[in-house]
Image: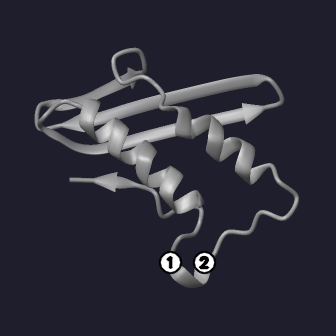
């Protein structure tokens, strides 16, 4: 389930990023009702820090947060889908 949500988030951000992107960094921090999100995009012409508005946040981000807050949630590292495996590169 979480792999599908991560893939949906990555696909959404990739589709909204500049055509010449090389790396996308998305950081989403939620503590209680406080939410912070940062998106940085590296392009051939250099970094574009702090993109947020033009890319937008897909509904899958909130679904993923709700899922990982479940007491029985486990990341399946054996399948290579650990917490750090969602990085997007060109």
**What residue sits 69% from the left and 43% below the top?**
65
Judged from this view, the residue extending furthest toward the bottom is 78
Above or below 58: residue 2: below
Judged from this view, the residue extending furthest toward the top is 53
- Left or right: 16 in relation to 1: left
Above or below 24: residue 4: below
* Quarter location, residue 78: bottom right
Give residue 13's position: percent from left, percent from top. Answer: 35, 37
Residue at the disc numbered 1? 80
* Quarter location, residue 30: top right
Question: Are discs 2 and 1 less than 8 Å apart at CB?
Answer: yes
Give residue 74's position: percent from left, percent from top. Answer: 74, 69
- Left or right: 71 in relation to 56: right
Q: Nearer the viewer, residue 20 or 58?
A: 58
Residue at the disc numbered 2? 77
Mark 1: few/some/many CA within 10 Å (<14, 14-19, 20+): few
**What residue sits 50% from the left and 29% below the top?**
38
Q: Which image quadrant: the N terminus?
A: bottom right
- Left or right: 63 in relation to 71: left
Give residue 44's position: percent from left, percent from top. Answer: 11, 38
**What residue sits 19% from the left and 32% below the top?**
46
**How far separated are the C-alphas under marks 2 and 1?**
5 Å
């Amino acid at each position: 389930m979480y792999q599908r949500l991560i893939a949906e988030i990555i696909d959404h951000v990739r589709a909204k990023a500049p055509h010449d992107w090389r790396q996308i960094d998305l950081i989403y921090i939620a503590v209680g009702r406080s939410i912070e999100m940062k998106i940085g995009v590296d392009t051939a012409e250099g970094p574009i820090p702090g993109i947020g508005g033009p890319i937008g946040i897909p509904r899958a981000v909130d679904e993923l947060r709700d899922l990982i807050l479940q007491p029985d949630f486990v990341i399946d590292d054996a399948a290579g889908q650990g917490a750090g495996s969602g990085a997007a590169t060109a």
